Image (spheres, helix red, strand yellow):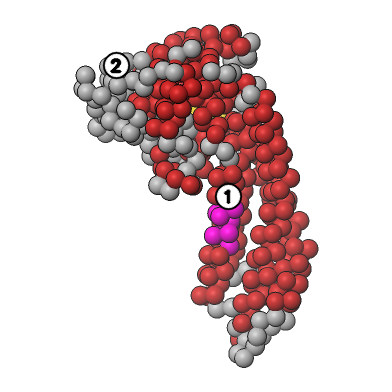
Amino acid sequence: MSSAFGLNTQIYNNHIKSGILLAGFPVLLLGMTGSFFAIMNALAQHAVPGARTNWTEAFQAGWQGILAYGQWAFLGAFIWFVIAYFFHDSIMRMATGAEPVTRRQYPKIYNMLENLCISRGLTMPAFEIIDSPALNAFATGLDEKSYKIVLTRGLVEHLPDDELESVIGHELTHIMNRDVRLLVVSVIFVGILSFLAQMIYRSMIFGFQPNFYSRRDDDNRLGGAAMMLIALAVLMVGYALAMLIRFALSRRREYLADAGSVELTKNPDAMMRALMRIAGHDELPHFPHEMQQMCIENSHSSIIGMFATHPPIAARIKAISEMTATPIPQSLPPAAGPRPAGPWGAQIAEPQQPEPPRGPWG
């Protein structure tokens, strides 16, 4: 297998995508602002008995709205971006419930990561743990000082050492390929869009009315139902843009991270077994929807394949098998230990030996 984790083209593409997100976001903000005021004007015209919608006037109203309120949208977005940039660690921690852990607490995972980093001359990221029985992981951070690998407690306590090392190698590859930086920037932007949509919605609920509509009579003002429709439309536009940003991120990154992990660990069998064990056990209740795209698996996105943030695990396992000429494992060895005890409910049963794991891969 080639050194997929170090592909310069992948890093270069991620830099370009990050730049496009940064440069294109002001355009999206202005587009949302102008669309909002144009729709307001069109519906206000429609409210006048017998009047026909003058779209030229509506577009002019949209432009006036951009001139009058665009700077405030930029100011709010800039403040949010600065806060998110400098405090993304704390924001991620509060949103996911992750807690930092030290080498003394978890020497095994730190030793695994150290060996992988030494082999490539990399600065070691830190570790954080999510107290959940789910089997999942993700990486976060914007630079070497803030890179972190986040594992669930279920993953650490459940996976055999070679499989756990493969998952750590997968997340380390995301850091090396700069996937993490791109995903964090996208999460920040999605948060801004969601916040703006909610702000517009609340402003309309409480009766906000642009001052250049004050010339109209009270009888011609939009009714409550029309205002709710506008609010709903703006919310849909905001979330649609957020989804477009999310789905624009190539699913190829997961194939490359799998390949990078195999290159680091020299153990394709362990990577395939780890994916088999994770399949169907990745769900993290109450985990922010925007951040699920950062995880090693996101089964929630698989309802409609074309909109999935991750390729199917079966396809990932098949790709590893074909690229390394390694047979797909037909059975899973016993788990490293019992599921961690806690208030989260029943344990997830392991397949009984020698019964092969259930799934479309074998």
Q: Is residue 244 left or right of residue 61?
A: left
The residue depicted at 60 percent of the width and 31 percent of the height is 179
* Residue type at numbered disc 1: Leu
Residue at figure coordinates x 76%, y 56% from the top left: 71
The residue under the point 52% across, 70% down is 228
Q: Quadrant of residue 298?
A: top left
CA separation, marks 2 and 1?
Answer: 40 Å
Magenta region, main secondary structure: helix
From where the camera sits, is residue 125 visible?
Answer: no
Along the viewing direction, whichever of 165 and 289 lies nearer the viewer? 165
In percent of width and height, residue 50 lies at 62, 91
Q: Is residue 246 above or below residue 60?
A: above
Dot 2 alpha-carbon crowd within 10 angstroms: few under 14, some 14 to 19, many 20 or more: some
Which residue is denoted by mark 1 in the rendering? 244
Magenta-highlighted residues: 234-241
Mark 1: give few (<14), some (14-19) or many (20+) Cα within 10 Å: few
Residue 310 place in picture, x, y as percent:
48, 37
Q: Is residue 333 visible?
A: yes
If the image is split into quadrants, where does the C terminus sit?
A: top left
Tell me the residue that label 2 is attached to: 333
Q: Amino acid at mark 2?
A: Pro
